[in-house]
């Protein structure tokens, strides 16, 4: 038996810090000092004493697995292209209505007590969809969402808009990738939707300024 990251948990190394995101608690935090060294030993398959392991387990980051220990930091290629390269979409009453409903849903779904469950449900729904090659269809829908989003009085926020657009796309059988990222000095968090070839929410320049910490 070994150890793996708990569901909804990811980590990255940035600016010499080891940063974790635990979606079940809607919390970012850093491992430092002895705990960071113990985590490095665990990843390398080296021994830790029982008190040290108890501290690591108490963080909620880890769970037992029947397989050998496998704990990897988050890695994903962030595209340098965004929807600025997609032909501009005009007014769409259908998308205005869809986006308003999706934003209302996202505003509720992103609450601290719900976000972990929201994304666990999203994983299950997405897994049941036969993934189609990302291409013009997903980018056209994302561009239509962006073109009509301004009509909604709800202020734009990266998590709300990523969840809302994802909700619309998954309902149509299109599965993008939801990425959470961080940067330091000062600490900031960001999230966005992407395909292998394009950023779907926000800009590519902004997304590439963050280190991915969790991919859903």
Image (cartoon, rainbow, N blue to C red):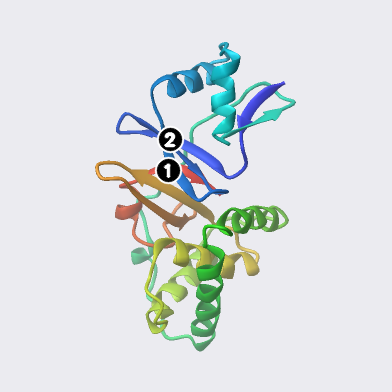
Instruction: Report whether 56 appears left or right of 190.
Output: right
Is 160 located above or below residue 126 in the figure? below
Q: Give the numbered dot on residue 12.
A: 2
Q: Secondary structure at mark 1?
A: strand
Locate residue 9: give its quadrant: top right
From the top left corner, tell me how far across and down residue 63 is, in percent. 65, 32
Instruction: Report whether 87 appears left or right of 45.
Output: left
Is 145 located above or below residue 21 in the figure? below
Residue at the extreme left of the image, as rendered: 185
Q: Secondary structure at mark 2?
A: strand
- Whichever of labels 1 and 2 marks the residue nearer the N terminus, that label is 2
Work out whether residue 89 or residue 65 is closer to the camera in this orientation and state it.
65
Going 73% across and 56% down the picture, which residue do you hit? 128
Given contact means CB atoms under 8 Å apart, are the residues at marks 1 and 2 in contact?
Answer: yes
Instruction: Report whether 155 appears left or right of 173.
Output: left
From the top left corner, tell me how far across and down residue 17 is, in percent. 35, 31
From the top left corner, tell me how far across and down residue 12 is, in percent. 43, 35
Q: Residue 196: tell me if it is visible.
A: no
Work out whether residue 157 or residue 74 is closer to the camera in this orientation and state it.
157
Going 35% across and 52% down the picture, which residue do you hit? 207
Location of the N terminus by quadrant is top right
Going 58% across and 67% down the picture, which residue do you hit? 167
Locate residue 51: give its quadrant: top right
Work out whether residue 141 or residue 120 is closer to the camera in this orientation and state it.
120
Is 95 located above or below residue 83 in the figure? below
Instruction: Give the residue pinned by disc 1.
Output: 212
Instruction: Report whether 156 appears left or right of 103.
Output: left
Residue at the extreme front of the image, as rendered: 51
10 Å crowding of disc 1: few (<14), some (14-19), many (20+)? many
Cα distance in 3D space between marks 1 and 2: 7 Å
């Amino acid at each position: 038996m070994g150890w793996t990251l708990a569901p909804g948990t990811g980590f990255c190394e940035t600016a010499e810090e080891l940063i974790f995101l635990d979606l079940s608690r809607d919390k970012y935090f850093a491992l430092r000092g002895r705990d960071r060294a113990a985590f490095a030993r665990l990843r390398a398959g080296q021994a830790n004493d029982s008190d040290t392991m108890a501290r690591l387990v108490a963080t909620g980051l880890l769970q037992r697995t029947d397989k050998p220990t496998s704990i990897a930091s988050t890695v994903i290629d962030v595209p340098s292209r965004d929807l600025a390269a997609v032909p501009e979409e005009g007014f769409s009453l259908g998308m205005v209505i869809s986006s308003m409903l999706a934003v209302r849903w996202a505003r509720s779904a992103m609450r601290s007590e719900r976000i972990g469950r929201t994304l666990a449900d999203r994983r299950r729904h997405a897994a049941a969809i036969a993934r189609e090659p990302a291409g013009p269809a997903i980018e056209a829908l994302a561009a239509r969402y962006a073109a009509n989003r301004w009509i909604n009085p709800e202020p734009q926020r990266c998590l709300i808009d990523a969840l809302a657009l994802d909700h619309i796309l998954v309902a149509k059988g299109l599965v993008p990738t939801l990425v959470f990222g961080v940067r330091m000095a000062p600490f900031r968090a960001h999230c966005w939707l992407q395909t292998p070839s394009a950023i779907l929410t926000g800009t590519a320049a902004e997304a590439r300024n963050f280190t991915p910490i969790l991919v859903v």
